[in-house]
């Protein structure tokens, strides 16, 4: 299961794709420990760069990502995980996908509606 | 068109998705200059970390990536480009997608055939 974690200081980007719809839901980063945890548990687990710790997606919201298959690229420095998302949305902002903004005439425009209320799921951020 | 280039030393990962099939073709990195060039030209242009320079995908092979739309994520630190790939494959190894290896029982297994001969396209690597 060798991967090249050296190019980004111990991390590789991990693209999360809905295995049913093909939609890209998010991009996270994995270190070797989180990658192994992902493989062992079957649920996508990332390394949080801001919190400096492992983070199983959905540990707070319950919106976990059940892994269907994992691919790597030619240089073995990126991962693609096709998943079944549990719950109405992946993005902590309340959207199905974190990629809810599209470039239109030089501006990022929100191109879809929320699928859940993040305040009800995560509570107020204190 | 603000993006957060600060988390990875001036770069953001850019996921390249076939706009017709939904397949993920590759993951590259963009700095601000290559992102602007991508928007201006309509062809995906990356920053090569190994060569330390801008690199329009397909400048050698002709297998350019015509951009259909561009999205960013909630943190504005990743990009998703849906593209029309020109040519039989995106990967310099001769495959349609760089993600031609899938994890099976702890081993990376090549899960598809090449779509072109990279030696004929790129010549011998000297």
Image: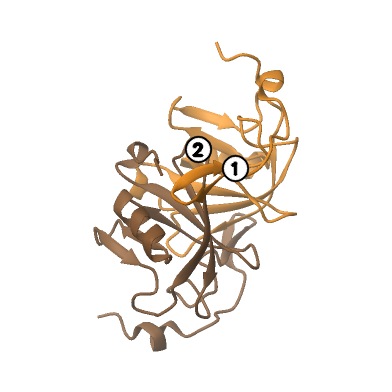
Chain colours: A brown, B orange
- Whether residue B1 sits left or right of residue B89 in the image: it is left
Circle 2 residue = B33
Between B50 and A55, the one lying in front of the other is A55
Q: Which SS class for mark 2?
A: helix
Q: Chain of mark 1?
A: B
Q: Residue furthest bottom?
A: A120
- Whether residue A2 sits left or right of residue B17 in the image: it is left
Q: Quadrant of residue B62?
A: top right
Q: CA distance from mark 1 to mark 2?
A: 29 Å
Residue at horizontal 52 percent and vertical 72 percent from the top: A85
Q: Earlier in the sequence, mark 1 or mark 2?
A: 2
Residue at horizontal 29 percent and vertical 80 percent from the top: A125
On-image quarter of the N terminus of chain A: top left
Q: Are marks 1 and 2 on the same chain?
A: yes
Q: Which SS class for mark 1?
A: loop
Residue at horizontal 75 percent and vertical 36 percent from the top: B88
On-image quarter of the C terminus of chain A: bottom left
Q: Are marks 1 and 2 in contact (CB under 8 Å)?
A: no
Circle 1 residue = B100
Q: Position of residue A64 (x, y in %)?
A: 44, 73
């Amino acid at each position: 299961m060798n991967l090249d974690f050296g190019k980004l200081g111990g991390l590789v980007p991990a693209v999360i794709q809905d295995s049913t719809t093909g939609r890209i839901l998010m991009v996270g980063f994995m270190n070797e420990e989180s990658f192994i945890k992902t493989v062992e548990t079957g649920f996508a687990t990332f390394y949080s760069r801001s919190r400096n710790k492992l983070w199983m997606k959905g540990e707070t919201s319950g919106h976990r990502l059940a892994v269907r298959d994992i691919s790597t690229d030619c240089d073995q420095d990126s991962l693609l995980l096709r998943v079944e998302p549990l719950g109405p949305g992946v993005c902590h902002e309340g959207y199905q996908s974190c990629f809810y903004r599209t470039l239109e005439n030089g501006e990022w425009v929100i191109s879809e509606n929320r699928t859940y209320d993040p305040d009800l799921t995560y509570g107020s951020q204190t």
